[in-house]
Image (tube, coloured by chain):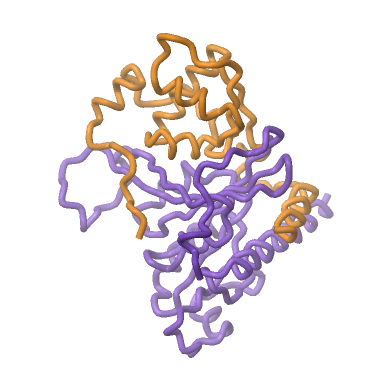
Chain colours: A purple, B orange
Amino acid sequence: MDSAISEPPSRTPLSDTAETGLKIVVVGGFGVGKTTLVRSVSEIRPLNTEEVMTQAGVGVDETSEVTGKTTTTVAFDFGRISLNERVVLYLFGAPGQERFWFLWDRLFSGTLGAVVLVDTRRMDDSWYAIDRLEHHKTPFLVAVNRFDDDPFTHSLDEIRQALALPDHVPLIDCDARVRSSGKDVLITLVDHLYELAMAQEMTP
Amino acid sequence: MTPRRPVDTGDPDRLYTVTGGRSRADDDSFDLVTLVVSECEPTAGMQSEHVRILELCRHPSAVVEIAAELKLPITVVRILLGDLLAMGRITARHPRAADSVASMPDSALLKEVLHGLRNL
């Protein structure tokens, strides 16, 4: 695949009629493929931005060489999908590690829902993300990014059990590198959100 | 891996200069995906960051996109946008469900999203 050549430009203006921005967050451990998933479905080359946070409430960063810092900086990637002339969806790749929990509260309030991307070789990385999403009552699905060297030894049932995932949370396979697969992940999530919204609207 | 440090945060003094000494936006009215639109052209003598924002927002741009383009932290961009909004130089199109964390968006909007995704 000639992804380097076909990669879209980062600076493509939105339509002048765009009026509603929506958010979906992709969370998961380091190297699980969050940016890859964002890139595969985004109409722009994923951009990277940062937020400066005060040190208060931040856990100890063992890899940090700097001590006594009063602020810390958290980077995240995002991509964009124009859904129609008015509605534009932004996808955020967010670090799932425990020490970034404060970032979620601040930056990702009001998201439609979340995708938890899982690498079966490092399932431990997903627990914290799932726990926080349940705590925040943010609807989510779990997508298992199947890597080339993953021999499919774990079935989805086994993964559901390993993650102690309730039955109502959708769990699907995906290949984050493939656009159609990334698109399926988003459709499955929004389908799930739609069902939840319908159920809520039926309840007086 | 893409470079992880596009923002020049090595010099906090520079950021304070950009914001006139403020480190906090007056309110949280600018969501990450609030779409910002310029209402005028830059004029002579305007702060360079304001000029860049007005140029960028000739077409609607989300707050995160502005931050990425200007290579400034979100907090700093929020402060700059607050200034421009107060001067009437930009308008903001806020997301519908920004302040209701736990409540669901309505099914009609979600249906629209589904339709858009299926047509990709």
Q: Nearer the viewer, residue B115 or B78?
A: B115
- Residue A163 in picture, x, y percent from top left: 50, 75
As drawn, is B36 to the left or to the right of B68?
right
- Residue B6 in picture, x, y percent from top left: 33, 43
- Residue B113 in picture, x, y percent from top left: 72, 52
Q: Name the residue rendered at 39%, 26% in the picture.
A: B24
The count of marks equals 0
Q: Quadrant of residue A31?
A: bottom left
Q: Is residue A196 above or below residue A126?
A: above
- Residue A104 in picture, x, y percent from top left: 46, 48
Q: Is residue A127 above or below residue B32?
A: below
As drawn, is A161 to the left or to the right of A61?
right
Q: Is residue B62 above or below residue A165?
A: above
Q: Is residue A203 above or below residue B83?
A: below
Q: Quadrant of residue B61?
A: top right
Q: Nearer the viewer, residue B17 or A47?
A: A47
As drawn, is A85 to the left or to the right of A130?
right
Q: Nearer the viewer, residue A65 or A179?
A: A179
Q: Name the residue rendered at 21%, 57% in the picture.
A: A63
